Amino acid sequence: MKKSLFTSLLFTLAVALPSQEPPAKPNVLRMSFIPDNNVAALEKVAAKVSAYLQEATGMEVRYEKASDYQACVNGLAANKLDLVWFGGVTYCQAVERTGNKTVLVACRDIDLKFKSYVIANQALLDSGKVKKLDKLADLKPLLSDLTFTFGAKDSTSGHIMPRHFLVQAGIAPEKDMKGGPQYQGQAGHGATFKAVSGGLVDLGVLNYTVWDSQKPEDQAKAPIIFTTPEYVDYCFAAHERLGKDTIGKITKALVALDAKKPEHKEVLDAWKCKAFVAADPKLWDGMKKVLAELPKDFLK
């Protein structure tokens, strides 16, 4: 009788007390890409990327379309996203926003030596008002009579790094550019190219791979007048809550993409590269310094 009463009491306590085991995490990998240019092209292969990573990780991979750059940063920090294709700036912002819990997974081979093109409407070169520049400082005396557009304000290659190089050359965009600098919002690099090639803006700066991907007859409408120094840029990054094993599987899977395999080449072509590589996150320390030098709340 006593034994039965004791057993019953233990059972009652076991039911009443909360379990000490942590709740199981859903076996889902939520993935997104910053909408910086031709998002439709990446979305076309999102299903293929999802299937590829699902096989590599054993997790269900869900692609989540992002409304803008900061939706990706905030989504990773708020546990709404797990894996994001970031630009250099948004990667650094995510590291800060998550308290250094954002882990660099892999980047493209081209991201370790990225660059931007300053382009001009062809009519300006034809008129002699603008010519190809030997150094960026030569642009300063021309800007008071010319309109200039960046891409999105928090774009690495469409704004932050080009602005950095302009400032280094003694150019103050807000003071030296006619009417101040323009921005293309979230429409990205393609919008910058269209604005300059169509004559809506005199000059602009954009991601070099976007210019390179244009038709030759369109490139002729907005030729390159200056190429910036190289810098690091895009990367895949994940929140550490995924765990080292899962993040390691994702890195291994991305690095294993082989352009010789048709099913892999389609993915690599969408990212305009020949391979993904593992990289040291310390390489982005220089970009963190560039961001730290901006005025407070500049990107807000």
Image (cartoon, grey):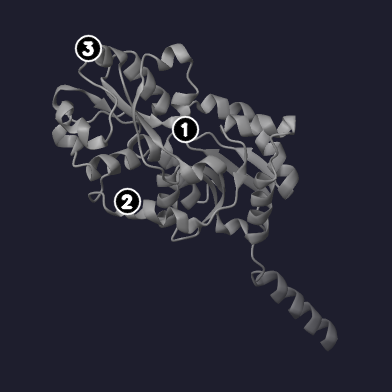
Q: Is residue 292 above or below residue 33?
A: below
Query: Is disc 2 in contact with disc 1, using a CB cutoff of under 8 Å?
Result: no
Q: How many labels, in total? A: 3
Quarter holding the C terminus? top left
Q: Residue 176: which quarter of the image? A: top left
Q: Which mark is residue 289?
A: none
* Crowding at mark 2 (Cα within 10 Å: few <14, some 14-19, many 20+): some
Query: Could you tell which of marks 1 and 3 lies nearer the N-terminus?
Result: 1
**Mark sitting on residue 35:** 1
Task: Confirm whether residue 299 shows in the render.
Answer: no
Q: Sort mark 1 into few (<14), some (14-19) or many (20+) by Cα contacts within 10 Å.
A: many
At a point 42% along the width and 51% down the height, the residue shown is 92
Give the residue type at disc 3. Answer: Ser
Q: Disc 1 residue type?
A: Pro
In the rendered image, residue 230, in percent from the top left (x then y), is placed at 41, 43
Mark 2 or 3, which is nearer the eye? 3
Q: Are marks 1 and 3 in contact (CB under 8 Å)?
A: no
State the residue position of label 2: 290
Q: Disc 3 marks which residue?
A: 127
Say what secondary structure mark 2 lies in.
helix
Residue sitting at x 57%, y 33%: 271
How far apart are the two marked residues, 2 and 3, measured between alpha carbons?
Answer: 36 Å
Image position, residue 120 (x, y; %): 30, 21
Spatial separation of the CA atoms under disc 1 and disc 3: 36 Å
Please identify the residue farthest to the front as the structure is shown: 134
Q: Is residue 157 left or right of residue 129?
A: right
- Image coordinates of residue 123 in percent, x first then y, are 27, 12
Front position in the image: 39 or 241: 39
Amino acid identity at mark 2: Val
The quadrant of the picture occupied by the N terminus is bottom right
